[in-house]
Amino acid sequence: MGYQKHFLIFLIILVLTRLISGSEAPESLVIASHCSSTCGGITIPYPFGIEEGCYYKDKDDNSPTTTMKIKCNHTFNPPKPILGRNIRILNISLQEGEIRLNNRISYSCNNPSGRWDSWMNLRTFTISSSKNMFLATGCDTYAWFKGKRYGKNYSTGCMTTCNEIDDVLVNGNICNGVGCCEASIPDGVTNITITAYSYNNHTQVKFNPCSAAYPVANDAFHFSQETLTRELSYYLNEKPWAPVVYNWGIGTKNCSEAEKVGSRILCKSNTECINLTHEQHGLDGYRCACKKGYSGNPYLPQGCQDIDECKGTNSCEKPGYCNNTIGDYNCVCPEGYHGIGNSTHRCISDISNTKKDSSLVPVIVTAGIGGVIIILLIISFIGYWRHEKRKMTTLREKNFRDNGGEILHQKVSGMDVLKIFTIQELENATNKYNEANIIGRGGFGVVYKGVISGNQPVAIKRSLKVDPNQVEQFINEVLVLSQINNRHVVKLLGCCLETEVPLLVYEFINNGTLFDHLQDEGKASCFTWNLRLKIALDIADVLSYLHTTISTPIIHRDMKSMNVLLDESYTAKVADFGASKIVPLDHGQIDTMVIGTQGYLDPEYMQTFELTEKSDVYSFGVVLLELLTKEKALSYGKPEAERCLAMYFLRKMKEDRLFDIVDKNITNDPKQVAQIKEVANLAKWCLRLKGDDRPTMKEAAMELEGIRRMGSQPKYKAEKSFDQLENSGNYMVGIAIDDDGNTNTNTSGKDSDLHSLPHFVSTLGDGR
């Protein structure tokens, strides 16, 4: 009975110590006695502070001034901690180096004064990519997220539509694109501006008077139909906010640089210094953490105190066997016993052989009971393992059916065109999708490098989830792509449909993209004109093949230099058919979402919302310009007149100053100069405003073949010169991006002929 009493007391003490150790102790949070440790119930730990002398301020003249001063606003009840002008603090984490803030929601309503754009300029604070998402709500809405990332402009965004309130079926923390859309946020973004727009000023969807856009912490997002019906008065009176998680650090020097100036580093005794990499923080810097076995505030002298593990959770057999040490603990058996004294290696009594013999029966009984318990545990484990295995098998079978596996299996039965991989095969190939194997990211998925049986390298693409209503169309497209037999197309080898999202397996191309070769100064200088002309012809040939040669024509819809891979012999191979569309028998196209990439997107699409084979022709024309100039299709860092490569090129052609923008590395040979002029004329032809006025890809390929031979004049020519085209009023529209990241249109004709077409949003992939 006494043993049971002591055991019960031990359990109570253990529970209490766990509760105490699990809560954050408020002591040692301030640097001086006059410093406040809380404001309105929110803990304010140093290096943050309220009173003068209570917060960290970087005094290094060679780095940007950073301050962690917090204002405790007592006009509220309870008081509210404020950062900067009017940003409310919700929580500060020393361990994670994070701060949770309330940011104002941006909105645009059907009222001349119904607009609010939010700004988040927190100097060295950067928004967390893993803890937040960017959202927009509305029924004719598109939204921009813009800022600075590593000193360069960055933009992303999304769009959402709906016709009836009943269309919005999801209430909760899921955005399905109807009434609500989302976009991921990269690390290292500062100086953020959020803007919401409406395509039609909310005139067509009466129940939705306002659009809204905002970043929000993943655990705080909730969407409902009520969001779409909010009036302007809600945004004016309620002034809605959304919680956002930011990363913070100390100064702009890493650990080793800060240690060079001695006491200037904030990490005190019993701490370790952690460098902030660019993936965690927009600037260099560091943060501090208590060493293992210590807890407290690592930024204060003696802030990290030894944890008495003997008062909390430990591995010792009994509480009395625990011996606390500085930074650790050990288990010690009491007098009369020997052994380690923990839960797995218990203390053994030092008794005589006679006593051992006399106690043999209870030992045997105890061992028997222990054996029964062990057997029951083993049986339970085996039962649980079998249950989980059946559950996993059932889930894989469901995913296989939902992703069209049964349809695909029927269609490939007896055909040797496509391999259906298991989830285990692709996990082994990618080392369980290790991030070190990621070789590319885009708007349609993530690409991993893997090695399948026979040491064959492959590229494995984790695609977006298939729409259940379009499963059969997805399977048909996979079948058609797998049967494409062209050496200039990245071959689709197979797929895996047992996961929630389909996985596609392609051949691996090892020499990078055309974009990489053109933007690398060392590679571009060795990138000869003949090689560029060959690559242009390779691309034209394969697009002509996709449009006209195969039985089921395919429109690529995202043709750009980043989607052209080069093998070791610089043979071009077109990749990323995630946006591709198989052309129906009547060749009709109806697209209701933005496809493609800014700078390459057919301007006619902004008026017709249709993508055709001639849209690929326009994008190919932009790729020709990249080969001629080695410039990017869109360059945010350049003057406004030069940002859009297509628009800048047409202006130079009109002024008869083509060679102002042609890459100087390819203009040495007079014969090449003549060929360059012909390729420029072909590019101008491909960039015409109306799709009907552009060549087909077959005509473009034949034109390039004639230019390469150059012994005879090219077979195909534009029916009108560019000047004649201008005089006829058929202007080419170029897309320009201003300092705020807004998309505008501009003609290459007279200044008075400027037009403004609707804005559109397209996720920019890797941010370039």
Image: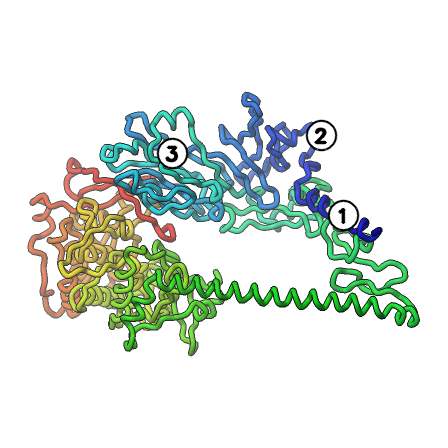
* Of 669 and 579, the residue lying toward us: 579
Inter-mark Cα distance, 2 to 1: 29 Å
Q: Which mark is residue 106?
A: 3
* Of 542 and 57, the residue lying toward us: 542
* Of 625 and 413, the residue lying toward us: 413
The x and y percentages for residue 207 are: 28, 33
> According to the image, label 2 marks what residue?
33
> According to the image, label 1 marks what residue?
311
Above or below for 240 versus 93? above
Left or right of 586: which side holds 758? right
Above or below for 232 versus 60? above
Res. 150 visible in picture: yes
Q: Secondary structure at mark 3?
A: strand
* 10 Å crowding of disc 2: few (<14), some (14-19), many (20+): few
Q: Nearer the viewer, mark 2 or mark 3?
A: 3
**N-terminal-most mark, 1 or 3:** 3
Left or right of 36: which side holds 77? left
The x and y percentages for residue 233 are: 36, 25
Q: Secondary structure at mark 1?
A: helix
- Type of residue at label 1? Lys
- Type of residue at label 2? Ser
- Type of residue at label 3? Ser
Can you tell which quarter of the image residue 78 is in?
Answer: top right
Residue under the point 40% across and 65% down: 397
**N-terminal-most mark, 2 or 3:** 2
